[in-house]
């Protein structure tokens, strides 16, 4: 999620997370925060229950068992502050999409297997407000859309965060056998969103369930 990507930017030592060069965002020797995703290869994401194909090189975050949710994985193209795709690969009932302290003052709602598309959209808005520092949220569209061969939804939105930068997002997903499968694209609205949207759509079209 976006809050995780901002933490990754800080860990990289620069706001844009662009400290690496020819080796992508991963750093020298493969010990950085990111791992390069090669294009035209089937990549299993999250817990491996969903696979996608990237149309060009992206950067996937290395997993951290202490802070990561096993069903959630983040990728970025230009750095976590500018753009990112979050994959949710079969989040089960009664689980949160992000790890939180039990005593946190504001809790992100848990996913429920009977959630409708508007309820998932509401969950995402709460997630951004609680964990991402969003101060203004605008729903642009919520429409039916097939995803991996199942009836699903497309949710378009934009938001203003505490850094005073407008960002735009699109979530495409479906509840399949009681689990949430979703791809979430979020990027700076002015340039990075339209630039990377074709990549996101190509990955959505390539998404497959893996048992």
Image (cartoon, rainbow, N blue to C red):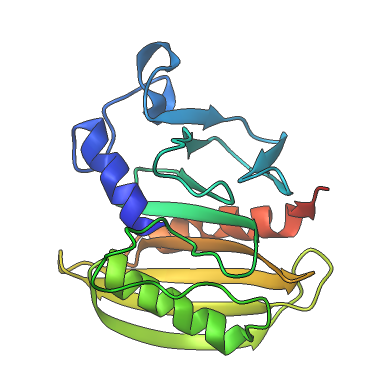
Q: Looking at the image, which residue sits at the far front?
A: 103
Q: Position of residue 38 (x, y in %)?
A: 61, 30
Residue at figure coordinates x 56%, y 88% from the top left: 118
Q: Is residue 197 left or right of residue 27?
A: right
Q: Position of residue 189 (x, y in %)?
A: 34, 67
Q: Is residue 184 left or right of residue 48?
A: left
Residue at figure coordinates x 79%, y 53% from the top left: 208
* Quarter occupied by the N terminus: bottom left
Q: Nearer the viewer, residue 62 or 165?
A: 62
Q: Quadrant of residue 164?
A: bottom left
Q: Is residue 50 left or right of residue 93?
A: right
Q: Nearer the viewer, residue 195 or 206?
A: 206
Q: Position of residue 150 (x, y in %)?
A: 81, 72
Q: Position of residue 67 (x, y in %)?
A: 39, 44
Q: Nearer the viewer, residue 47 or 18?
A: 47
179 lies above or below 206: below
């Amino acid at each position: 999620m976006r809050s995780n990507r901002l933490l990754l930017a800080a860990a990289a030592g620069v706001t844009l997370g662009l400290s690496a060069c020819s080796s992508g965002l991963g750093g020298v020797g493969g010990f950085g925060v990111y791992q390069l995703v090669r294009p035209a290869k089937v990549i299993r994401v999250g817990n491996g229950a969903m696979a996608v194909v990237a149309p060009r090189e992206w950067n996937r975050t290395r997993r951290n068992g202490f802070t990561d949710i096993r069903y959630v994985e983040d990728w970025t193209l230009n750095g976590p502050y500018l753009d990112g795709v979050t994959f949710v690969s079969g989040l089960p009932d009664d689980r949160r999409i992000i790890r939180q302290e039990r005593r946190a003052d504001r809790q992100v709602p848990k996913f429920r297997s009977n959630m409708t598309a508007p309820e998932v959209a509401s969950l995402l808005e709460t997630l951004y407000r609680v964990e991402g520092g969003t101060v203004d949220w605008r729903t642009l569209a919520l429409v039916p859309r097939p995803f991996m061969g199942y009836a699903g939804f497309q949710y378009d939105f934009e938001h203003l965060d505490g850094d005073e930068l407008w960002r735009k997002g699109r979530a495409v997903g479906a509840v399949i056998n009681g689990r949430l499968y979703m791809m979430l694209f979020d990027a700076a609205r002015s340039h990075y969103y339209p630039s990377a949207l074709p990549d996101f759509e190509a990955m959505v079209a390539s998404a497959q369930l893996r048992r």
